[in-house]
Image: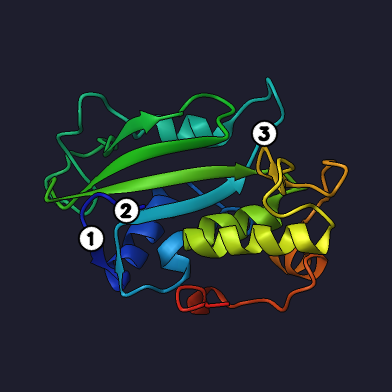
Amino acid sequence: MSQGDRITLETADKVVLALYQHWQLNPASVFVAGSVRRRVMTVGDIDLVAPAVSPNAQDPLYERIVTTVTNPPPRTSMFAPEIPQGTNAFCTAVRGLKPGFLGCDLTVSCWGGRCELKVQISRYTPQNVGWLMIEKTGPWNYGRWFLTRWKIAHGIPVGGNEKASIDNHLVGKDQKVIPVATEDEAFRRCGLEVTPPHHRDAFIR
């Protein structure tokens, strides 16, 4: 849930583009989620979904992000003409940033510190990218509704102790992972038609 400053969707798109450039993100494998993907008119945070790395493997994404992190909070920011040449530290690590991270929260300073935005990055595996995109696109109650429908589709008792998702991977009645390599596959395996992201805020069942 957003707790920081709010900006227009148009401005959020510019921040996302700047992050892709600063962190050299590949749009073919790093996806925008959250309210930006749902095209909500005002945005309070930026959600990105990126591929995970194998345990103990080099993590280029972490290495690129950490060069832009400073603690205490940065004295410079994105989109500020006063940034000295060669200075690139514009965000603060809040939680989880380490090599091989599965999820982290950052605070990004924009426009000379006049705006502080939360940026959340979640990492996916080939087996859960479809579900993670649904979960991280939100809103949260849509994800909860989807998990209930998943339980019904796969014979998992609703209201029981069995889970529909373990470690962010969808599971069946036997609690073993059911791979969903795409969002469309996750909907199909749930017996549902795809709900476009921009319709999910108004979705009611």
Which image quarter is the C terminus in? bottom right
Badge 3 marks a residue whose secondary structure is loop
Front residue (pair 169, 84): 169
Query: Left or right: where does residue 7 sit relative to residue 32?
Result: left
Picture disc at residue 71: none
| Residue 182 visible in this rendered orientation of the protein | no
Q: What is the spatial separation of the Cα atoms under label 1 and label 3, in whole angstroms?
A: 32 Å
Residue 53's disc is: 3
Q: Earlier in the sequence, mark 2 or mark 3?
A: 2
Q: Nearer the viewer, mark 2 or mark 3?
A: 2
Q: Which mark is residue 6?
A: 1
Q: Nearer the viewer, residue 134 or 149?
A: 149
In the image, 43 versus 145, the foreground residue is 145
Please name which of the two marks, 1 or 3, marks the residue nearer to the observer.
1
User: What residue type is disc 1 on?
Assistant: Arg
Residue that carries the numbered disc 2 in the rendered image: 2
Q: Are marks 1 and 2 in contact (CB under 8 Å)?
A: yes
- Which residue, as the protein is rendered here, is positioned at the far right? 174
Residue that extends furthest to the front in the rendered view of this protein: 159
Q: Give the total number of marks visible in the rendering.
A: 3
Counting from the top left corner in percent of width and height, residue 204 is at 53, 78
State the image coordinates of residue 129 (x, y, percent, origin top left): 68, 52
Q: What residue do we see at 54% from left, 44% from top? A: 122
Residue 170 visible at all: yes
